[in-house]
Image (tube, rainbow, N blue to C red):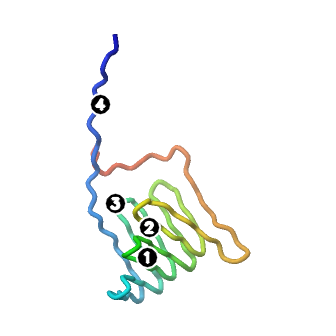
Amino acid sequence: MFKSAIAAPAIVTPTSGLVTIESDLQKADNSTGVVTATGNVRIVYADQRVVATARQAQYFTREGRVVLSGDVDVIQETGHSIRAEKLVYLVESERIVAEPAAGEQVITHYQLNAPVPNPGLQP
């Protein structure tokens, strides 16, 4: 006889969807759907506990694509990080493609067994 397992309810982490962008200059082009931030760009995506810095960031709203370029550093609260010259983030599929500067390499630090932060759980 099989015992039926009762699945625990999934923990739903509330998200705000808020992304904060700081830069020297920001502009949006409604005809192309491209938002561009240049100069000392700092992006904070609190829901994912990620901070990214670059010289330029572009969000292609129609394609759901973010392109960071120029001394890109992306750091996650868990200790994961990536350093590249250019990084493309595909929002819908949550995929990253990183490219190095000429003659350089992409550097990734991945913290094995890093705890997964869950802001929905309070001690």
Residue that mark 2 sits on: 51
The secondary element bearing badge 2 is classed as strand
Q: In which quarter of the image is residue 81?
A: bottom right
Alpha carbon distance from label 3 to label 4: 26 Å
Q: Between tags 1 and 4, which lies in front? A: 4
Quadrant in which the N terminus is drawn: top left
Residue that mark 3 sits on: 47
Of residue 52 and residue 67, the one placed in the foreground of this image is: 67
Q: Earlier in the sequence, mark 1 or mark 4?
A: 4
Q: Which residue is drawn at 59% across and 57% down?
A: 109
Amino acid identity at mark 1: Arg
Q: Which of marks 2 and 4 is nearer the N terminus?
A: 4
Amino acid identity at mark 3: Asp
Alpha carbon distance from label 2 to label 4: 35 Å
Residues at marks 2 and 1 touching, judged by CB atoms closer than 8 Å: yes
Residues at marks 3 and 4 touching, judged by CB atoms closer than 8 Å: no
